[in-house]
Structure formats: structure tokens, C-alpha cells
Amino acid sequence: MNDKIIATLRSDQQPSSVQKDKILTFLNKKYGENIELIWEKDDEISHGFILQVGADVYDWSMIGKINQLRSSLEKVSIDSDNYVSLIKENVKNWNPEVNSMEIGYVEETGDGIAIVSGLKSVNYGEIVYFENGQKALVQDIQSEDIGCMIFGKDDEILEGTKVYRTGKTAGIPVGNMMLGRVVNALGESIDGLGDLKSDEYYPIEKPAPEILDRKSVDRPLETGLLSIDSMFPIGRGQRELIIGDRQTGKTAIAMDTIVNQKGKNVICIYVAIGQKASSIAQITENLKKRGALDYTIIVAATASQSSSMQYIAPYSGTAIAEYFMDHGKDVLIVYDDLSKHAIAYRTISLLLGRSPGREAYPGDVFYLHSRLLERSAQLSDERGGGSITALPIVETQAGDISSYIPTNVISITDGQIFLESDLFFSGQRPAVNVGLSVSRVGGAAQTKAVKKAASTLRLELAQYREMEIFTQFSSDLDETTKNQLKFGKGLMQLLKQNQYSPLSQSEQVITLVVALNKMLLNVEEKDVKSTMYGIISYIKNHKPAIIEEIELKNVLSDNVKEQIILSAGEYLEARK
Ligand code: ATP
Ligand code: MG
């Protein structure tokens, strides 16, 4: 190779020829004869100079020397009797060492991305920092330069700004002090309640638990929503996708689930990606009002923040969740939503110059979400038995679940709750589409009581839907068909549930037993819901033993089932 090695000398004053010769002699000794010395003016270096050869940097500037002196003085033992003389000794014999460290320079910046040259041995995922102390995450490594995502505002970072390595990967503070707080994607408080201090840091990206460290999902995570707990039960450690068009009640399901965890020893983390700050304020307020904020942490990267912050938010949220899982706790994490997350990543990738693939997303967008969701787990007893249950949310366009991001996330999760616009606008809320929703592992975790009580529900609803379509245009229906339609309509009424009004296990069981035994056939459709409330409070007030047995034993014995039917009969009789 005949290429010359370029050595760059930076100082505020042009070096004299004697100085230049000395430096060249040093360079020739160290790097051989084939070297060229270039001088660049840098007003920030007063006294001394910085010499850079490839990745090696020799800091002979005043600041560099002072830093070296400081660290050499730190080695002096404080206990020494003759402390002062030791310092004197140290200063007298002190010789500035030639340290090599990597310094990079910003080549290009904009849209929260900086292209940096000179950091030859930097690692993917490493945190680097700029002269002004601002940090960035290395996201792209090319042969000539690297691309990094700047955290925070990028307007102070200009071409030529120096960049330093930290040798560390991104981490965020974790701990109990975060409960009840709202933090940004870097774990910094944004709720005005003061700084969060922690001695513990968790990396935001971490390999998922190994198969041997996991066990099967077998404990329920109740949402309090009859339509989900009865037909699509979720287990602790499961990943259940909530998917649907805009404004179909996706966030509402997640919120209800969080509120329902009160007193159930579950820590909840709500990760808001690309939402308006006002929505996040509203969510915080709603949780607070219902006493659910005490056990919840909100990680928010708002729509006004950079794509970088939106991109790392779910990983940061997961790191916080992992801390609790490692301490044997059960955690519920909501990612609201991963469609916006994918868009943030697409923006970053396009800015980094990666080639776009399907729907302009980069090729690794699947890996993006799979490595995130794989971190949800039910840990084995040896690992403490903690768990992370994930409720990722994905937004569809016109109900199309076969587009790129929805199909990806569907294939990564253990099932999906599909919400439908038509149902939502017809007043069927939560708007769960019973035909397209599924929960693949939750069955093993569902409480025996609900499982037994709900056994025929899906089938009945499927038959109702089919019949409804067939009879849409016919006027004269026979009595059996009419009754069956009425029965189905009644069931649909009972699956309606207002926001923030979770049903307990026993309330769900009573509803299912009464409804599936066709006890409400003579009740007007509009009165079905209120009649059911009446039956439940009648049992609560007059037959508390029924409630107690279900809640304590989590099973539905034939005896209890009979008692529910009897009590409901008594109530309906008395109402006549
Ligand atoms: P976006 O796509 O904007 O994020 P989303 O799918 O998350 O919307 P939500 O914000 O949860 O939908 O709900 C939309 C509206 O419907 C809200 O005003 C919410 O209060 C209302 N809503 C949701 N669920 C119910 C329910 N079960 N009963 C009554 N109203 C509901
Ligand atoms: Mg929403």
C-alpha cells in the first residue's frame, strides 16, 4: 500500500517549523516514514495541541494535561501523614503521558441523526457524547463513518462537533422509586415531581430469558372485561396483541386491564409512543383517579419528541419491567402503540440511508419487534418466578390485518384481540370481534370457575352471528329461530361493558351461568344489562357464600352453579 497516513494536528496557533519537525520525528518513529502532517486551526485548544492519527489521539492540550494530572493525584493516598510533600513529589516527577483515545467529528447532522467520522472501534448500541454533554446512541456502522441517534434537541450539534466514546451501552435507572411516576425514554422524570435517583441501571437492550429459565404460563392476568376473560383469557407471561383501527377502544382495554390489577400484586408499565402529550396527561389523571397510578409507571415518548426517543421508549419500558421481574414480581407492560414505533424506526433508517423494503420499512423491522416481545416471559421458580405480560397495541387501516406490521406482530404474539370499527360504532363496546380474536396460551391460565362457566359461550355467539346474517332479510321467522336470535342479542348486551367498570371473577361467573342457562330470554333486550346487575347485587346481599366460594376456591362446583340458578330465579320471580 502506498497510501499515506494522514496525521492531523489541531491547535489555536500555527506550529513553528521546529515544533513540526519534532512531531514528525515522533510520528515517523511510531508510524513509519509514509506519513503526512496536516495542521488545522482550532480556537478551542488554547495552549498545546491535539494530534490525531487514524483512531489514535494524543492529547497535549492544556485541558488534557490538567485531566492527566488530576487522575495521577487521585492515586495519592489521603491517609498519608506527609500528604503535602507527597503531592509536591508527584507534581515534580509528573510527566504527561501520551494517551490514545478516540475522538470523532460530526460530519453531518439533522433530524436527530448525526453522522460521525473517526470513531473506528465504536460498538453498535454504544452511547457516545458530544462536546456539550449531549448523548447519542450508535445505530449504524459503516466502513467510513457511523450513524447515531441524538437524544434530545439536535440544534447545538453542528458539523465539526467533537464526539467521544463512553464504552457503555445504553441503560436506564430502574427501581421502586419509579412507581407512580411519568418518565421519558431515558428514565428521566417528566411529571414535575422531582428527579429520580437510583443506583441501579438496566441496559435497555438485553437478550430475552433462555428457554431453560422459563416455565409455562399458568396463572391468569384478569382484564376484568367479560368479553376477554371469558373467551380470550390472558396468562401472566403471555403476549396478547390488541389490534384495530383508529378509535376502536384499544387504549381503553389496556387502561381497564391496568385498573383491574389493583390489589392483585401486579406492577404495570404503560409505554406511550408517539402520542400527544395531552393524551398522556389524561391517561395519568385517569389512573390516578382510580388509585391505579401507585403501582404504575408511565414511559412516554410524545409525538413532539424525536424519532430516536420514540424508538427506544419500548426498550426502556421493558428494562424497567425486567428489573421487577428479576425481583420475582409480576409485571404488565402495554406498548401503545407499535405501529408508531415502527414508523419512528422507519424514519431513522431512512435518515441513516438504509435501503427501504416492503411499505418502505427497513428489512429488520420484524426483528425489531420480535426481540422486544421475546423479553416477556414467565420465569422458572429457580429464577424467582417473576413474569412480564405484554399487551402490544397495533393500529390497522380499514381493518386490514394482513398488512406488513400487523402480520409481523400477530406472528410474534400468543394471540390477538381484534377490535372492529363497525361493532364499536354500533355501540358494542369493547368492540371485540369474536371470530378473529384468539388467545393461544391463556386457556391453561384461565381460572377454572370462569372456564367452566363460559364453556359454550363462543359457540353460542358463533351460531348467533351466522343466524343473524341468514335471517337479515326474512320477515316471518319461526319461534325457535326468534328465540335463538333473542338469546344471542342478550349475550351481546351482556358483553358490553363501560370503561373502568371491571367485573370480578365471581361477577363474571354469575353473569355467564345465568345467561347461558337462558334465564333472561323473557327480559327485553334493553333491560338485559340492568337485570343482570340486579341479580348480581341480589346474590351479593343475600347469598354472600356463593361469591366467597368462587373467589376463594377459584372453581365452580355443581352445587354453587345450582345455587346461582336458584337465586337468579328468586330474583326474577320477585321482580314480576
Ligand atoms: P386511538 O386510535 O386514537 O389510539 P383507541 O383505539 O386507543 O384510539 P380509545 O382511545 O381507547 O381508542 O377509545 C376511543 C373512545 O371511545 C374514547 O373516547 C373512549 O373513552 C371511548 N371508549 C372506549 N372504550 C369504551 C367502552 N368500553 N365504553 C364506552 N366508551 C368507550
Ligand atoms: Mg389509543
Image (cartoon, grey):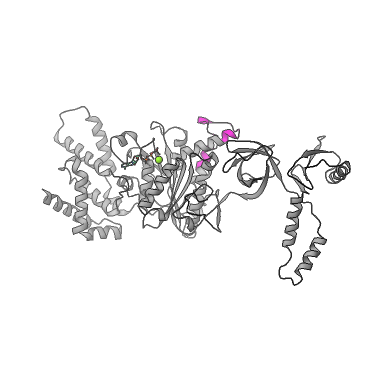
Left or right, 3 with respect to 547, comes to: right
The magenta-colored residue range is: 349-369
Depth check, front residue: 24 or 13: 13
Spot occupied by residue 467 in the image (x, y as percentages of width and height): 23, 33
Asked if residue 122 lies left or right of residue 255, the reply is: right
Q: Which quadrant of the figure shows ligand 1?
A: top left
Q: Residue at x 24, y 30 (%)?
A: 470
Residue 183 magenta: no
Q: Position of residue 464 (x, y in %)?
A: 24, 37
Q: Toward which corner of the image does residue 107 lie, by quadrant?
A: top right
Query: Does residue 445 appear anywhere in the picture?
Result: no
Relative vertical location of residue 438 with respect to residue 537 in this rendering, above or below = above
Q: Residue furthest top?
A: 473
Q: Is residue 197 above or below residue 336?
A: below
Q: Residue at x 16, y 54 (%)?
A: 566
- Whether residue 69 can be seen here: yes
Residue for point 76% across, 53% down? 65
Vertical placement of residue 440 versus 555, above or below: above
Q: Position of residue 287 (x, y in %)?
A: 38, 50
The answer to whether 478 appears left or right of 127 in the picture is left
Residue projecting furthest to the bottom: 81
Decide which of 357, 293 is in the foreground and name it. 293
Q: Nearer the viewer, residue 14 or 373?
A: 14
